Every structure is written in structure tokens, then in C-alpha cells.
Amino acid sequence: MQKIAMDRISEFFSAIAAERALYLPLKKKGAVNFGKWEEGADVDLDALHTVKSPKGLFFPQSEDLVSFKMQGKEISIDAPDAPDEKFAVFGVRACDARGMDILDRVFLSDPVDTYYAARRENGIVVTLSCSAPEETCFCSVFGIDPARPGGDVSAWIAGGFLYVKALTEKGEALLSGLSLLEAADEAEIGPAVEQVKAVMEKLPLKDLDLTGIDGSATEKLFASEKWAELSRACLGCGTCTYVCPTCQCYDIRDFDTGKEIRRYRCWDSCMYSDFTRMAHGNPRKSQVERFRQRFMHKLVYFPANNDGMYSCVGCGRCVAKCPISMNIVKVAKALGAEAKE
Ligand code: SF4
Ligand code: SF4
């Protein structure tokens, strides 16, 4: 383990940014989101959650895939090179780091998504321990420890220092190039880790019970009459999917620029009425069907097909952001009761 005084953290960021792009939580117009670091940037390491998770650095909200040009009867195809920016992302919380594991299951399975794979290869994830988890957090329900956040390098802020520890070869390579770090004893972060544990014990959602929500009662849960009541007020706004670190649905569209046809992909939401619309129409015609799909996928289908891994990390963003205060916690409670009946 190594450390650097917090009053020298700009030097630390500058040293990383000298070798590769550095993304970290930045405050802009009152909102905190991951952005590219530059000298004088308004870095916010106190905000627990960025509005959007860091998944956009690996799976951008919108990206060009290929373009086509017509010249007479000739069609030329221009496919961009694989993303090659070398970068580090600093300040990823434990829940969002687990979110990357879930995205890996989707995008790195056969057939591999080469755009995502290139960014995973080129990116180094530096996580940051939470110091004060919020009431909406329930990461521990999924076995996540916010004080041991994982990634390629884990970082902690304690006693006026930033502590860092490499967990992978990529992480070691990053830290070995930073001569401004000094050696530290792991015991120095002990009080900070204990403080997080104490806060976690007091969180209201820490005892969310997922017993019975495991893929063994899929048909029963699918047919539950509770979906109608749960989804009644859903606006289909898609906010819950856009802020979620594990949602991975996207659409592919063609755009005529006047000079070429540009094919791009962009995030989409299973909560939208035109999601996966085909020539014959939308397979999920009502909001209750779309609502059920989102939560069945996260809590039932995904774990059933991924060794029990839920497609939720308990970050609490949807709990905080849904305009009608509907969220996965309320759904899990209702489904749990249904599974036990
Ligand atoms: S559950 Fe809430 S955030 Fe999600 S689509 Fe419905 S109203 Fe919007
Ligand atoms: S479903 Fe909600 S709590 Fe779970 S990971 Fe997504 S935004 Fe976070």
C-alpha cells in the first residue's frame, strides 16, 4: 500500500494524466458526473454517486459504428478503428465497480462486443472506498463491501492522505509509474474501514431479503398479479435505466447526414414503448409488461443465467431518482412476499 497527502492530490492526478487520459467525478452546473481531468477542474470526491455511473466510459451513451457513402452505383463503407484511448477512471465506487462485472458478462460473452472490449482493455479502474454511504444504498445485499471496492487499484481517503493499493497487473503498472507515492501500512486505513462498517449497519435497506427471488419461481413471479399495482404509476420515463450502472440495452439507428449514412448505437430503455419495436409492432405492448421485463430481468432472468449474479448492485440511484418513487427495492419486497406465498 502507498499514500500521498491529500493536499498534493492535484500532483497525483497530473502525474496520471501525463501518461493517459484521466476521468473522475467533476462538478458542473451543480451535478457531479465523470469527466476528463485537467488542471483546475472542479473535482468532487465527496459526492457518493455521480448522476450517471461510469459505465459510459466503456459503453458510451452514443457512438458511431460505421458509415456508408454512395458515389454513383458504388457504396463505400467506412468502419472506425477500435477505440484506442488509454485512460484511467478514478473514484469509481464499489457498487459501480461490480456493475462493470455485470456488463462484462453481457459484452464480453460470445459474440464479444469489440468496442466495449477495447475500452475495457485500455481502461484502468481506480475505485474509491465510500466514507458515508447514503440511506438509499443497499450494496451489501449483493455481497458488496463499500470499504473494499475492488477494481485495478483501490483507494481510500483517511487522516489527510489518499491511500492506494494495486489489485491487478494493470493497477501495478499504473502505480509503479508514480514516483510521488510513499510506502504506507495497511493498518493506517483501519479506522476508516471500521467507520464505513458502522454506517452500513444503520442503513435502512441493508436487510432487503431476496430469498425466493432466484430464478426458481420464474413462472410464478412472471404471472404475479402484483405487477399491475406496482407499475400503475410508472411514467415510462426511462430515468431508472439511464442512471443504472448495469442497464445495457441499446438501439442501432441510421442517420442521413446528407453526405453519408452514419450508423450509430445509443442507450435505449426497456421502459419505452418503442423499445425493440419490429415490423409487426412491439412485443411488449403495455407499460405493465415493460415494467415487469425490467425487474424480472434484473432479479430473476439474469441470476438464473449468470450463476446467481443479480443485475443490480444496490447503488440506489433509481431509488433516489424515480419521479414516482417506484424502485427495485419495492419490487423485490413484493416479489419476495409472492415467492413465499
Ligand atoms: S420506474 Fe420510475 S424512473 Fe423508471 S420508467 Fe417508471 S417512472 Fe420512470
Ligand atoms: S436497479 Fe437501481 S439500485 Fe440496482 S443497480 Fe440499477 S440503479 Fe442501482
Image: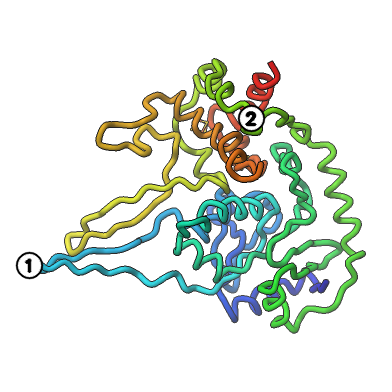
Q: Amino acid at mark 1?
A: Gly
Residue 43 drawn at (x, y percent): 64, 62
The answer to which quarter of the image holds residue 148 is bottom right
Callout 1: few (<14), some (14-19), or many (20+) C-alpha neighbours within 10 Å?
Answer: few
Amino acid beneath label 2? Ser
Q: Quadrant of the N terminus?
A: bottom right
Q: Which mark is residue 216?
A: 2
> Is residue 130 placed above or below 310 in the rendered structure?
below
326 sits to left or right of 136: left
Q: Is residue 74 left or right of residue 228?
A: left
- Tag of residue 72: 1
Residue 112 image position (x, y, % from top left): 47, 60
Badge 2 or badge 1: first in the primary sequence: 1
In the image shown, does 280 or 251 lie closer to the viewer? 280
Res 283 → quadrant: top left
Q: Horizontal placement of 146 versus 217: left or right? A: right
